[in-house]
Image (cartoon, rainbow, N blue to C red):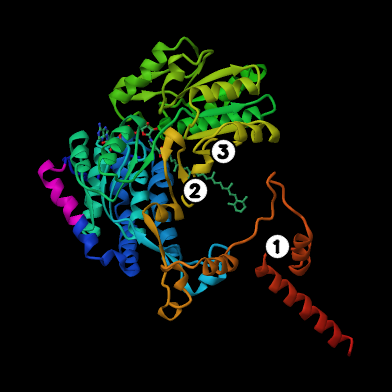
Amino acid sequence: MEYTNVSIPAFEPTPLETIPAIASAARGAFRSHRTKSLQWRQVQLRKFYWAVEDYKPQLLAALQKDLHKSTFESLLTEIDWLKKDCIFMLDHLESFAKDEKLGSPAVPAVYSIMKMRVRKDPVGTVLIIGPYNFPVQLLLAPFIGAIGAGCTAVVKPSELTPACAMVIKEMIEKRLDNDAFAVVNGGIPETTALMNEKWDKVFFTGSATVGKIIARKAAETLTPVVLELGGKNPAFVTKKANLALAARRLLWGKTLNAGQVCLSQNYILVDKDVVTTFIEHLKQAYREMFPNGAKASPDFARVVNQRHFFRLKKMLDDTKGKIVMGGAMDESELFIEPTAVLVNSVNDSMMQEESFGPIFSIYPVNSLDEALNIANLVHRTPLSLFSFGSKAENERILNEMTSGGATVNDSYFHATLNTVPFGGVGDSGWGAYRGKASFDCFTHFRTIAEPPSWAESLMRVRYMPYDLSRLSMLSRLMDKKPNFDRNGQVIKGLGYWMSMILCLGGTGAKGALVRWAVILAAHYLYRIRAGQ
Ligand SMILES: NC(=O)C1=CN([C@@H]2O[C@H](COP(=O)(O)OP(=O)(O)OC[C@H]3O[C@@H](n4cnc5c(N)ncnc54)[C@H](O)[C@@H]3O)[C@@H](O)[C@H]2O)C=CC1
Ligand SMILES: CC1=C(/C=C/C(C)=C/C=C/C(C)=C/C=C/C=C(C)/C=C/C=C(C)/C=C/C=C(\C)C(=O)O)C(C)(C)CCC1
């Protein structure tokens, strides 16, 4: 669908000389303490929800212009996604933000008078830097977490999706608190200027290459960072897999957004006995998705720019493998057909870098052992992995290979729900967000104690001159005796069994009182019914 009647301003980078003032205004807004008010945050989140709704035509037009993204995908993975995020944050904000009262087992009885609790403080003023592939959702989903947590924020959209960047700027500046929230547009110079400012946290989504630049710069001022990076993600298909299902679901993972999805598989390790059949199922799935070919399909997006088009083309030109599906390209449209390449070496160009496009390799293996060895060699901490096999094989894959997230029997389905945590592991990312994790990501969990004045004499033990007898008494009140010996074995002596009996099968006093109350109540009810 074309959006010809929607006007989107031409891209304008934010003037470099204005960036310090923008950051200063955001810091000043945080120091005003107005963001500490839950009501203030709720108003901003509600305003943001309606801004996304009201700017839908512009956002749809911008996503179409920047990425040839279909209305379907723009709604499913960008616009409706953000609206759901807003509603979820608003529905749960009070419970997320309220103090967490601390008690047993963390707090022993003698400390119960200290009113220990965890307060949820906003970390402060944050910088959010977004990528080009989901230029609305991946930039503004963390932004919703920052608002909910009570932070002020500056967001920096990708310059590779300029139409989206300009719509986002207008949307936020017209609808939200202008000092607390700002948009800086631009590329390397503007992002570098932003990183010269002091932030309380930086949230970066993008490549590992740039992630290192951001983390290195942030380290100079000990600024915490969240890095949402990419990976060379494996898919495993054993001979016990439902090959038709695996083919269709993995093709979905490489066709949504023209495969420009950091979560999607980079390569598929297929048992050699079924690789031919698997490829046939892949072609059949392609025919079903694109009856007239991917290029003619209004659903299939385009590669974002020439640089990425030629990067992908080079991967295909340099491969020693055999193209077994797809392969068509059209530079004039930045079109690359969903393409599968049969390879047999981890040194192949298709295996050396993250494809981040509609191309992937198929690597026949002799066994699951070999598949796991190859996957751990190619990238030990990918952002995601997908396994299609028997229950035992899938469990073994999850046990013997880590990843940021994983889906059994599908492509990146674990990341299609906006309310569950999402993030990398190792060099595919630091930290997580989405759902409550978005609130937590921008929150400092601050333990507070409040020892009462009247307890001063009871707390004398800590003062000099020290008195060991007082310390022994405190230890008797606070310390638990080990129930294990020097060989690490649990001691089930008389004390253990007495405790089990008195605590009615539990080992702690807390549950025992409840169990004893239930037993006694049942006893007396029985006696009443028996007329005794
Ligand atoms: N883990 C995740 O959630 C996601 C990870 N990614 C990863 O991001 C990459 C693709 O996205 P891109 O936008 O191309 O990433 P990128 O790293 O090129 O750009 C990301 C952001 O960094 C800025 N930037 C680029 N070069 C910079 C530099 N030298 N100094 C300072 N800032 C710089 C850009 O303006 C952009 O806003 C892929 O590697 C993909 O795996 C993409 C989407 C989601
Ligand atoms: C409706 C009832 C039922 C069945 C429900 C079913 C089968 C629901 C199926 C839902 C599906 C297939 C949803 C798919 C959603 C896909 C989404 C939202 C994709 C999102 C992709 C994103 C956000 C990508 C992000 C990419 C990133 C971060 C990147 O890598 O760059 C029952 C249960 C049968 C009965 C009750 C009614």
Depth-wise, is mark 3 or mark 1 nearer the camera? 1
Residue that lies at the very extreme toward the bottom in this rendered image: 531
Residue under label 2: 417
- Is 490 situated above or below 309? below
Q: Residues within 10 Å of mark 3 (few under 14, many from 20)?
A: some
Q: Looking at the image, is 227 positioned above or below residue 296?
A: below
Label 1 crowding class (10 Å Cα cut-off): few <14, some 14-19, many 20+?
A: some
Q: CA distance from mark 2 to mark 3?
A: 12 Å
Q: What residue is rendered at 76% in x and 63% in y?
A: 500
Q: Position of residue 150 (x, y in %)?
A: 32, 60
Quadrant of the drawing holding the N terminus:
top left
Q: Is mark 2 within 8 Å of ligand 2?
A: yes
Q: Which mark is residue 407?
A: 3
Q: Is residue 286 left or right of residue 74?
A: right
Disc 1 on helix, strand or loop? Answer: loop
The residue nearer to you, when weighing 331 against 460, is 460
Count of numbered tags: 3
The amino acid type of the residue labelled 3 equals Thr
Q: Indicate the quadrant of ligand 1 in the picture.
A: top left
Q: Please state the extent of the stretch shown in magenta in the rendering.
A: 14-26
Closer to us: 344 or 97: 97
Query: Which of the two labelled residues, at mark 3 and mark 1, occupies the earlier sequence position?
Result: 3
Q: Earlier in the sequence, mark 2 or mark 3?
A: 3
Which label was assigned to residue 398?
none
Q: Earlier in the sequence, mark 1 or mark 2?
A: 2
In this figure, which residue is indicated by the disc labeled 1? 507
Give the overall secondary structure of the magenta segment: helix
Q: Give how far apart the Cα atoms at labels 1 and 2 are.
A: 39 Å
Residue 364: give x, y in percent of width and height: 59, 17
For the C terminus, the image quarter is bottom right
State yes or no: residue 356 in magenta.
Answer: no
Circle 3 sits in a helix, a strand or a loop, which is it? strand
